[in-house]
Amino acid sequence: MTFSPQPSPDTTAWRIFHDASDGVWVDNFDGRWLVQTRSGRFPDNLPEEDAASVYWRPRDLDAATEPTHRAGGVVDAPFSVTENGALFKIDFSAGYSPGIFLDQRENRLLVKEKSAPGQKVLNAFAYTGAFSVMAALGGAETTTLDLSKTYLDWAWENFALNGLSREEHHGCKGDTFEWLATFARQGREFDGVILDPPTFSRHRKKTFRTDRDYASLAELAAKVTKRGGWMLCCANTHRLRFGDYRRQVEEGIQLAGRRATSIDSKPMPKEFCGDDYLKTLWVEVS
Ligand SMILES: C[S@@+](CC[C@H](N)C(=O)[O-])C[C@H]1O[C@@H](n2cnc3c(N)ncnc32)[C@H](O)[C@@H]1O
């Protein structure tokens, strides 16, 4: 097995092994490894002795299933990791994901670089607010939006870990589509809007599917993006071809009566080699 090197000295969590064809993925959280497999078998060539702890979650199990302990020390409490100098709380018992999606590292750093004092950044589908933390570290006033109170509370813990005061930032609990429509009605606009929805979501009787509904999401988001501002649009699915995805984003921006003055795609971090499920577009809007 060949492991990916640490991406930078101030990053202690990254994917150290990624093999989508055999279905083995290993994430290193500051020495604690989370191994995911597509088959029900644990990989027999993993040097478990190199890790402080090893946990395993077969992907064929329910997504919310806690990983099980395999080797090394037991991780029985949340801990923190560093990514490009920012701190994030990790909890192996949290089920769905331990608190951060490592494939978004480079986008998170770009969000910090694009954010500045005096700007407002909206992070929709925020999960534990990792993008919000980076925007806030860049100096922006952030709004963190998610359906789940549990994840919003986790986001505030991440803010606190980074010495960011909650007083200067906002949290919105509820549905992204409803909040975007409310912001538009109120005439609220943001310098940057981050859209990183799940592949599928259901709220009350409405469903959202990334491959089917991205244009309407982009339309609502473009309406609350300042002219001269940016949108970070992500789609996390193998099912959508990149060209079709880009067309949906462009269509949404046009429907909002806005224009995309530049659209850049971003590859995934290189340790996720050979897999292109995460599609990223950085769009400047006028
Ligand atoms: C894929 S995660 C987002 C990852 C996140 N952007 C990050 O970088 O860590 C999806 C998140 O969207 C939230 N969610 C799902 N449907 C939603 C909706 N209709 N409105 C707002 N949040 C939603 C979930 O609670 C979950 O936290």
Image (spheres, grey):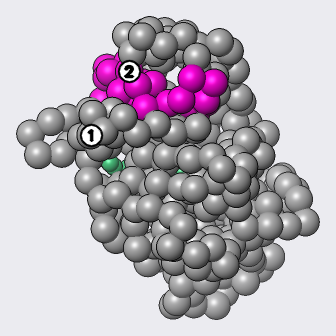
Q: Which of 222 and 61 is in front in this view?
A: 222
Mark identifier at residue 79 = none
What residue occupies the far left of the structure in this picture? 205
Q: Name the residue under label 2.
A: 219
Locate residue 205 relative to residue 221 in the image: left or right.
Answer: left
> Quarter of the image containing the N terminus?
bottom right
Disc 2 crowd rating (10 Å Cα; few below 14, some 14-19, many 20+) is many
Q: Is residue 189 visible?
A: yes
Q: Which of 243 and 135 is in front in this view?
A: 135
Q: How many labels does the image show?
A: 2
Kindly identify the amino acid type of the residue bearing the numbered disc 2. Answer: Glu
Residue that numbered label 1 is attached to: 182
For disc 2, does the CB lie below 8 Å from ligand 1? Answer: no
How far across and how far down the image is residue 146, in percent? 36, 55
- On the image, the x and y values in percent for residue 107 come to 68, 42
Residue at position x 79%, y 61% in the image:
84
Q: Residue 284, how many percent across, how many down? A: 63, 22
Circle 1 SS class: helix
Q: Earlier in the sequence, mark 1 or mark 2?
A: 1
Residue stretch rendered in magenta on the structure: 209-232
Q: In which quarter of the image is residue 127?
A: bottom left
Secondary structure beneath label 2: helix
* Residue in the image at 31% along x and 68% along y: 149
Question: Is residue 281 at least partly visible in the picture?
Answer: no
